[in-house]
Image (cartoon, rainbow, N blue to C red):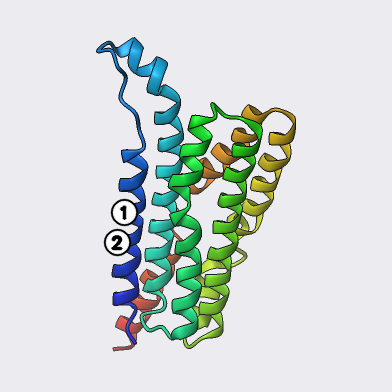
Amino acid sequence: MKSTRLEAFSDGVLAIVITVMVLELKPPEANGIADLFHTSGLGLLTYVLSFVYIGIYWNNHHHLFQLRPRVDGTVLWANLHLLFWLSLLPFTTSWLDDSRISRDPTIVYGLNLLAAALAYYLLQRVIMRGPEGHKVSEALGRDLKGRISPFIYLAGIGLSFIVPWLGLVPYVAAAIVWLVPDRRVERYLREHEGARDDEE
């Protein structure tokens, strides 16, 4: 079947995830800017970090299905597997914030990011094995960012055992790496659509 229904469902889930996260933010009891940063500053920072990750997955997910306009049951389940881990981000973000960056919540947050990264990699592999999967392989190439990201999360998890705040550094670094616009899929589609236009 066409991937449009899968994409629409995924968009809806990610929109709900963002909504749940923002509802977890607690406004300050007083009315000053200083009170905002004193009582809610950490919550805003953890929300921004998780929001960026959701945005990264949404963006990459959209690009991925530009290359695979039709899906089967295996792709549907692999996609649900990814959405499961992303749907846990409001919980792990809230725990991280409420604990004031304690060890175990920081580790669990990192495990959540790691699981989502592995689920996205699995989704890519499932798509690559299906019809027109070669397009994904050709567009992504060596996929260096995708390969090193799990190791960055593992580094953050390891650092969290030592100093929880240090564990956040790799998580932020990975988000920054992925924030750099990734034009591989757009470039691939532009080149191949141009080639088809020339043939016609």
In percent of width and height, residue 144 lies at 62, 57
What secondary structure is found at the residue carrying circle 2? helix
Identify the residue at image location x=70%, y=27%. Answer: 163
What secondary structure is found at the residue carrying circle 1? helix
Tell me the crowding category of disc 2: few under 14, some 14 to 19, or many 20 or more residues within 10 angstroms, Cα based. Answer: few
Q: Quadrant of the N terminus?
A: bottom left
Near-viewer residue (115 or 177): 115
Identify the residue at image location x=34%, y=60%. Answer: 13
In percent of width and height, residue 87 lies at 44, 56
Q: Quadrant of the C terminus?
A: bottom left
As drawn, the label of residue 16 is 1
Near-viewer residue (30 or 164): 30
Q: Which residue is mark 2?
A: 12
Tally of numbered tags:
2
Position of residue 33 in the picture relative to residue 184 (left or right): left
Q: Amino acid at mark 2?
A: Gly
48 to 71, vertically: above or below: above
Identify the residue at image location x=37%, y=84%. Answer: 70
Let me know if residue 83 appears in the view.
yes
In percent of width and height, residue 164 lies at 65, 30
Q: Amino acid at mark 1?
A: Ile
**Residues marked 1 and 2 touching at CB (< 8 Å):** yes
